[in-house]
Amino acid sequence: MSKKIGYAVVGLGVGRSHCDAAYSSKNANLVAVCDLLEDRLESAKKAYEGTLTYKSFEEMLKNPDIDIVSIAVPSGLHAELAVQALEAGKNILVEKPIDITVAQAMKIEQARVKTGLKVGVIHQNRFNAVMEPVKEAVDSGKIGKLILGTFAVKWFRDQNYYDAGGWRGTWAMDGGGSLMNQAVHTVDLMQWLMGDVYSVTSTMGIYNHKMETEDLTVSIVKFKSGAVATFTSSTCCYPGICTDIQLYGSNGSIEVDGDALKLWKISGGDSFEENDMLEKYGEGNGAAVALNPTLVLGHAVQVEDIISAVIEDRAPLIVPLEAIKSVRIINAVYESAKTGKEIFIVE
């Protein structure tokens, strides 16, 4: 390749992880960053030598050296900025959730189709090391027919988290609270592992914060396959307890907490396999990296993926229509909680 891909990032909160990945990539140059806050721009200027800084997104998009833009602004602005970038001829990587409503998210998909450019969406937990063998165990039928899933995001955020963010915990910019912001990754994993959702029946409330949206949801989720799951999201669980991803099939059971394997029981399997799996993945990604030093984790996987997608002229690993699935489920949970009805997922 004669020329490195020119990379830019808008939003220097979570966007810093995108900057780190692009700056260290062998196939890209971090050309520019954009944010409204001067202190963030100054910090980025010191951290990423030679990188241009912008307060105006429109001005940054005029830079011809930029091939890809990471969109890492508040969730309710994702579609607006993503479409702007696509119309300016830039490929994009969008932070989770792709946007806060299906209608808004579809604007990104429509712009992708119109421009023919690459669009990737961050759902980095799919790339936790443990998820590869878990996904394979489900897809291959190793654990049999899926019967039950239990998913619980039991995290904690103090009041300062919502007060300092301004946009967090608002319907307009965050699209929700504990479910849309914190648990969206686990919703994505749930539908990725268990398949298409048929319906949700939910309740939600504000239990331990002053906020507009919610800090607790509890749902019963039915799948088109006939399986069922419970899903809980909360930012009230001091000091932050766990992220349960648990699958129970007719031939086996798997339990994960975050990125760490806790249980691997397969009918007819031997103790060697079980012990081997727990040894490899029981400590989370750290243990996996020790076993495979070339393994790249987190946002870096998807930043490198969008760079490669542009170079190789292929689709990114997670495309808009896939990312929209979690938004559709979350919106249905909120609708169910507000109306008291079972909401059926219509795609």
Image (tube, rainbow, N blue to C red):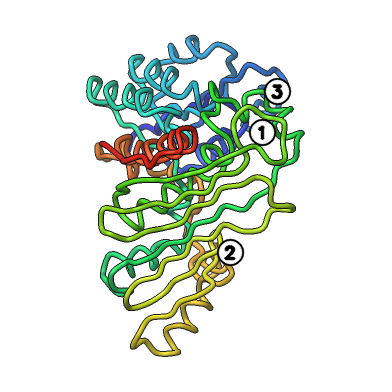
Q: How many marks?
A: 3
Q: Which residue corresponds to mark 1? A: 47
Q: Residue at x 66, y 25 (%)?
A: 45
Distance, label 1 to label 2, CA atoms, is 25 Å
Residue 42 bears which disc, if any?
3
Which label's residue is closer to the chain start, 1 or 3? 3
Query: Looking at numbered disc 2 in the image, what kind of residue is underneath it?
Result: Gly
Q: Nearer the viewer, mark 3 or mark 2?
A: 2
Local secondary structure at mark 1 = helix
Q: Residues within 10 Å of mark 2 (few under 14, many from 20)?
A: some
Residue 215 visible from this viewpoint: yes
The residue most toward the front is 340
Instruction: Choose between 289 and 84: the one closer to the eye.
Output: 84
Distance, label 1 to label 3, CA atoms, is 9 Å
Q: Residue at x 54, y 60 (%)?
A: 244
Residue 50 visible from this viewpoint: no
Local secondary structure at mark 2 = helix
